[in-house]
């Protein structure tokens, strides 16, 4: 723990302490008698003295002293009960303070700075402990009084939290307090007789990033139009940065991106927003992005646990996530095992007998006669009670009809003794027969064979069983074997083995079904019987701007494919797009939706294609489909950062990686469908439905990496575009069972016969091996950062357009007009937010 610095003479306690390590300004010491053998008399005496003292009077065995060179007075600034604890404080001092102190010329300033910093850390730790205990934190009230007095904001400006830190002014750090409020980031310092006061509105922040410099390894940099500010020496930098991200994101999206942006209910009223609300929002966003769940899904609990995984015959350590309508599991080892259990699929949640081998176990049984065993659940009783309440509510809202004739036998398959743990295989306990499934239209396991446009076309033509069809049969056999062990519903175990099967290309006969399962669109389909048919009936025949746009694009959607060279395909595409525009008027219809929907219709029935489109537009590619394509621009900005990180030589040569990011916009908007042969691009769509947006990022990097040499040799953006277009046009799928379909959207090339061909399977494999390490959490953090930059770019464009229109009409200087605009915009933003 940190100590309030008190001056002591080292020589007075020299014989009681042993120096373990030292630096220019700090000494780490161990008290004699701790960690020593019994040979030394002094050590034995000190140890005996400490042993007989009352616990409240005992001295901690480790401490850190502040020593200023040339001074004989030393100050204890930290102590610890263990070497590990004291080393954490030592490491913090080395990383955050040691290099900084060299900038001071006056030794007294060094002592004052360190003592002030330690006192601030003590105050922050005290405040954090009070907050965790859910008591009324007196320290927070004191900070609030100081915040109001120092910055004189209106009453509506609520303080969220505060932190001790340093603000850098050139090479000199100014120790003080950082205040995060609803609309502003504020800093106050009074050091060595000098006052520093900073106020930065969140809406003015253009860039928010973690950086490092020659003095410090961890710094938060705030960039506005006029200035960069660096803040460092936080006790918990990750927490501070997360709250800054959330406040900047909420403020900017609320003020600049009203279109399609819905705040959580807890954040609707600014005066009631708390630190806990922002932390919950960050956790909710990660949860929904990781499992690709609906935006309205709210996370209620995150619990450490272990899940029995039959394929590995052991329990896998991870975390259980419980939300409104789902129970999810993610292994601690990224990608090892994930499970998504929609509550409408759950039959029962039961507590089992607690044993030393299976502590605090629960069994969750689902409709497809499969069961999941979780153990080591903290507060199991409360968790099960809340899960059962939500389960009852979900079943009441969406009644499920299923065969219960075998439900009574399910418990016989569950663990009854320790010996069964190694022999029993939790997985498909008993597959539902096709006869049982015929009577339930709501069953969300694999549906019977469907009539997609692709299936209709295949019946009308003849196709021999050549080598490609044999490969297709082999893949189909591998999937069927996989279903037996890992499950065949939306609740299947999602492991690295599944990812490898998907990367090989999903068999044509399973593609639509697995897209439904991986995206969980099948749950929406089963939960809304008759919804699509009603939409079609209500929307067809109505003429408006959206329907006119749809009509213009119908015949531009895969025109080279036979399915859309007749009225059957065109009519199906019209119905799905029009129904979606009616379903979600905020999005309506946007270009590129037609291409995506065309491909969905090739492998799924109309109603299934509709719900797949809902999943893509509203969950998997959020904010992509609106007139400003904010989501796509954010991902372009993220992609630019990834290019600099993974392909630094290419980024350095091009000097402006944003040009490549712009070229790749269609890759993201159409999932490569518009610029690659269809039989190859559908394999990418397979991976997208399984792994989400990270698939497009890593495929994009793999394409650039494969063409890095030619791109470095290109003289301009046009030549770079031709290099990439020619490469993408020559990506083939050697395993595709059907004949190749020409790509109307890809750029054709005169040297089609001589240009080297790349197999899509090889490209996908390279993308996973070289660039697959990016986690969902990392991508979401980057998206949050870059969204600030993109929204500010839109605001800057709006400002320039307004000034260009107004300037000829008035006699003001441009600088004065900019100042008037900023002042007016600031007042409008403040009134809208407050």
Image (spheres, rainbow, N blue to C red):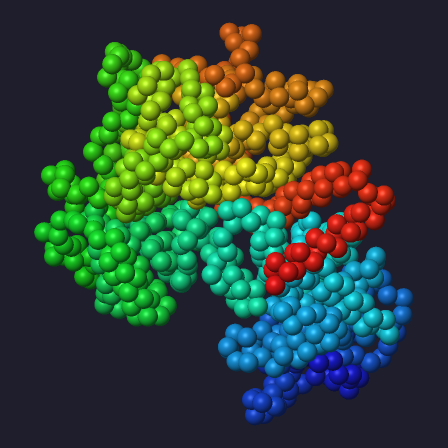
* Residue 331 or residue 809, whichever sits in front: 809
* Residue 179 or residue 47, whichever sits in front: 179
User: Is 622 placed left or right of 828 in the picture?
Assistant: left
Question: Residue at 46% across / 23% down in the picture?
Answer: 552
* Above or below for 234 versus 446: below
Question: Residue at 37% across / 58% down in the picture?
Answer: 323
In this rendering, the count of numbered labels is: 0
* Residue 8 or residue 744, whichever sits in front: 744
Question: Residue at 83% across / 70% down in the picture?
Answer: 195
Residue 691 image point, x, y percent: 43, 40
Residue 488 image point, x, y percent: 26, 41
State whether residue 559 appears in this view.
Answer: yes
User: Is 833 placed left or right of 498 in the picture?
Assistant: right
Image quarter of the C terminus:
bottom right
* Above or below for 113 versus 755: below
Residue 459 image point, x, y percent: 23, 17
Image quarter of the N terminus:
bottom right
Residue 57 sits in quarter: bottom right
Residue 208 image point, x, y percent: 67, 52
* Above or below for 629 versus 758: below
Question: Residue at 67% across / 51% down in the picture?
Answer: 209
């Amino acid at each position: 723990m940190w100590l309030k610095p008190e001056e002591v003479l080292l020589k007075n306690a020299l014989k009681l302490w042993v120096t373990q390590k030292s630096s220019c300004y700090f000494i780490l010491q161990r008290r004699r008698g701790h960690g020593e053998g019994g040979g030394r008399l002094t050590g034995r005496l000190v140890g005996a003295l400490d042993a007989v003292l009352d616990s409240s009077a005992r001295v901690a065995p480790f401490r850190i002293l502040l020593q200023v060179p040339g001074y004989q007075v030393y100050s204890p600034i930290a102590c610890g009960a263990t070497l590990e604890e004291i080393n954490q404080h030592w490491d913090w001092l080395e990383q955050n303070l040691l290099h900084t102190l060299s900038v001071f010329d006056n030794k007294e300033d060094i002592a004052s700075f360190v003592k002030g910093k330690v006192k601030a850390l003590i105050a922050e730790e005290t405040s954090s402990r009070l907050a965790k205990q859910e008591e009324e934190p007196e320290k927070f009230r004191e900070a609030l009084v100081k915040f109001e007095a120092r910055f004189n904001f209106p009453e509506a400006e609520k303080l969220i939290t505060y932190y001790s830190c340093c603000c850098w002014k050139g090479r000199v750090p100014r120790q003080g307090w950082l205040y995060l409020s609803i609309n502003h980031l504020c800093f106050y310092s009074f050091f060595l007789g000098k006052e520093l006061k900073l106020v930065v509105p969140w809406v003015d922040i253009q860039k928010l990033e973690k950086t490092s410099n020659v003095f410090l390894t961890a710094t938060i940099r705030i960039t506005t139009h006029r200035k960069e500010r660096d803040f460092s020496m936080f006790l918990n930098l990750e927490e501070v940065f997360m709250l800054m991200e959330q406040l900047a994101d909420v403020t900017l999206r609320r003020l600049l991106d009203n279109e399609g942006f819905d705040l959580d209910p807890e954040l609707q009223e600014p005066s009631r927003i708390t630190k806990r609300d922002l932390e919950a929002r960050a956790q909710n966003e990660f949860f929904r992005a990781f499992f690709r769940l609906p935006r309205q899904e709210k996370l209620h609990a995150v619990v450490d646990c272990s899940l029995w995984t039959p394929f590995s015959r052991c329990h896998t350590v991870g975390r259980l996530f419980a939300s409104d309508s789902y129970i999810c599991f993610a292994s601690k080892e990224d990608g090892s095992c994930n499970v998504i259990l929609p509550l409408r699929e759950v039959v029962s949640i039961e507590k089992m007998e607690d044993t030393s081998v299976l502590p605090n176990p629960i069994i969750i049984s689902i409709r497809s006669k499969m069961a999941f065993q979780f153990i080591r659940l903290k507060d199991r009783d409360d968790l099960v009670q809340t899960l059962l309440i939500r389960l009852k509510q979900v079943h009441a809202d969406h009644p499920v009809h299923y065969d219960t004739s075998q439900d009574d036998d399910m418990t016989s398959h569950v663990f009854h003794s320790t010996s069964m743990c190694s022999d029993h295989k939790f997985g498909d306990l008993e597959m539902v027969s096709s006869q049982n499934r015929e009577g339930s239209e709501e069953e969300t396991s694999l549906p019977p064979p469907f009539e997609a446009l692709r299936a209709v076309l295949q019946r009308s033509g003849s196709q021999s069983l050549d080598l490609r069809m044999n490969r297709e049969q082999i893949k189909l056999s591998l999937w069927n074997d996989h279903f037996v062990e890992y499950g065949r519903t939306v609740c299947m175990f999602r492991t690295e083995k599944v990812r490898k099967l998907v990367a090989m290309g999903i068999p044509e006969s399973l593609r639509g079904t697995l897209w439904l399962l991986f995206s969980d669109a099948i749950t929406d389909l089963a939960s809304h019987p008759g919804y699509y048919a009603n939409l079609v009936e209500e929307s067809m025949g109505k003429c408006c701007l959206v329907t006119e746009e749809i009509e213009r694009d119908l015949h531009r959607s895969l025109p080279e494919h036979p399915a859309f060279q007749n009225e059957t395909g065109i009519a199906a595409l019209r119905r799905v797009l029009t129904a979606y525009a009616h379903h979600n008027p905020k999005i309506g219809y946007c270009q590129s939706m037609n291409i995506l929907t065309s491909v969905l219709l090739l492998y799924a029935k109309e109603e299934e294609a509709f719900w797949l489109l809902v999943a893509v537009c509203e969950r998997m590619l959020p904010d992509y489909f609106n007139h400003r394509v904010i989501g796509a621009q954010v991902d372009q900005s993220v992609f630019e950062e990834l290019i600099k990180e993974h392909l630094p030589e290419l980024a350095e040569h091009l000097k402006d990686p944003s040009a490549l990011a712009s070229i790749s916009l269609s890759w993201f908007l159409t999932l490569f469908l518009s610029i690659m042969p269809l039989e190859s691009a559908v394999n990418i769509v397979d991976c997208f439905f399984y792994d989400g947006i990270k698939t497009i990022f890593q495929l994009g990097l793999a394409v650039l990496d494969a063409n890095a040499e030619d791109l470095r040799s290109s003289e301009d953006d046009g030549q770079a575009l031709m290099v990439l277009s020619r490469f993408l046009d020559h990506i083939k799928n050697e395993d595709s069972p059907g004949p190749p379909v020409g790509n109307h959207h890809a750029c054709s090339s005169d040297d089609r016969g001589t240009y080297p061909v790349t197999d899509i399977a090889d490209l996908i494999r390279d993308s996973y091996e070289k660039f697959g390490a990016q986690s969902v959490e990392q991508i979401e953090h980057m998206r949050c950062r870059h969204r600030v930059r993109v929204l500010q770019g839109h605001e800057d464009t709006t400002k320039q357009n307004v000034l260009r229109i107004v300037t000829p009409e008035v006699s003001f200087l441009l600088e004065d007009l900019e100042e008037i605009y900023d002042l007016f915009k600031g007042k409008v933003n403040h009134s809208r937010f407050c």
